[in-house]
Image (spheres, rainbow, N blue to C red):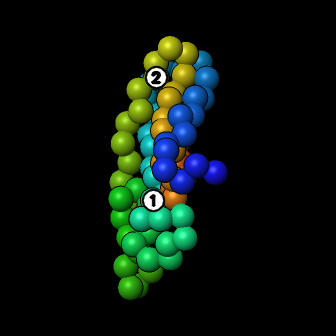
Amino acid sequence: RDAHRAKPIAIDVARTRPARLQRLAAPSLSASESVTFGGASVRSDGTFTPGSVAVPHESGGYRVDVLPGSAVLLTVPSS
């Protein structure tokens, strides 16, 4: 793994509407604190309210960068 550079990911699907992107992010690959999903941390009562950002459909698909110490959830519209 390259712990310092984002990895570009392409998902080629026949859609025209924007997808929604949520990131699981942490300050480092070994972090167990300050981890967020959709920009939100889990509260002490176990709840959280993640957000998402729009990813436009371009050139036959969706393109996202996955940063080190993170993961992404891309929700693609059904039509």
- Tell me: 38 left or right of 71: left
Name above or below for residue 32 compared with residue 26. below
Query: Is residue 70 at least partly visible in the picture?
Result: yes
Residue closest to the far top? 59
Mark 2 surroundings within 10 Å by alpha-carbon count, few (fewer than 14), some (14 through 19), many (20 or more):
some
Give SS at disc 2.
loop
Mark 1 surroundings within 10 Å by alpha-carbon count, few (fewer than 14), some (14 through 19), many (20 or more):
many
> Gap between marks 1 and 2, in whole Å?
23 Å
Name above or below for residue 32 compared with residue 28. below
Which corner quadrant holds the C terminus? Answer: top right
Which residue is the site of mark 2?
57
Q: Position of residue 41 (x, y in %)?
A: 38, 70
Q: Position of residue 52 (x, y in %)?
A: 38, 48
Marker disc for residue 25: 1
Query: Which of the pair 63/27 is nearer the observer?
Result: 27
User: Residue sitting at 45 percent across and 43 percent down?
Assistant: 21
Query: Which of the pair 5/46 is nearer the observer?
Result: 5
User: Residue sitting at 41 percent across and 33 percent down?
Assistant: 55
- Tell me: 57 left or right of 30: left
Q: Amino acid at mark 2?
A: His
Q: Position of residue 58 (x, y in %)?
A: 46, 18
Toward which corner of the image does residue 13 lie, by quadrant? Answer: top right
Of badges 1 and 2, nearer the viewer stands: 1
